[in-house]
Amino acid sequence: MCEPQRLRQVCKVMESYGERLQYSLFICDLSRTELIHARAEVEAKMKLSEDSVVIVDLGDVDTGRFTFIGRRRPLPTHGVRIV
């Protein structure tokens, strides 16, 4: 069972690498090295048999891929990864 305290720790790590878009959705503009470090930090906080994190690499930014309703969020300049 996912423990709220442990998941808050994962969220704090993610907030240090990117911007929180929703409760547990983060957009990060990371180099390969930064992604490796972020992943290691997150894995250290997780209980791998119970928790899960999904990393989606969206490749080069194509602003046509994102539609904003309301306040527009700044997008990374390259290699968007949503975690």
Image (spheres, grey):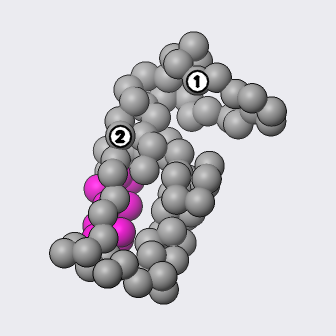
* Residue 3: numbered disc: none
| Location of residue 8 in the rendering, given as x and y in whole percent from the top left corner | 51, 77
Q: Magenta part of the protein: which range?
A: 34-43
Q: Residue type at mark 1?
A: Phe
Q: Nearer the viewer, residue 4 or 73?
A: 4
- Seen at 52% across and 52% down, the residue is 25
Query: Which three-letter amino acid code belongs to the residue tagged 2?
Result: Val
- On the picture, is 78 further left or further right than 58? right
Residue wearing tag 1: 66
Please, what secondary structure does the residue beneath circle 1 have? Answer: loop
Residue 9 visible in image = no
Label pair 2/1, CB-CB below 8 angstroms:
no
Q: Is residue 35 left or right of residue 12?
A: left
Q: Is disc 2 placed on a helix, strand or loop?
A: strand
Q: Position of residue 68 (x, y in %)?
A: 70, 27
* Vertical comparison of 74 with 27: above or below: above
- Total marks shown come to 2
Residue 48: tell me if it is visible: yes
22 or 15: nearer the viewer: 22
Residue 81 drawn above or below residue 79: below
What residue is at 68 percent from the left and 35 percent from the top? 74
Magenta run includes residue 36 = yes
Percent of width and height locating residue 16: 55, 64
Marks 2 and 1 sit apart, C-alpha to C-alpha, by 14 Å
- Asked if residue 48 is positioned above or below residue 6 in the image, the reply reads above
Residue at mark 2: 56
Q: Is residue 10 magenta?
A: no
**Residue at the far front in the pictured view:** 1
Which sits earlier in the primary sequence, circle 2 or circle 1? 2
Give the residue at x 70% y 36%.
Answer: 73
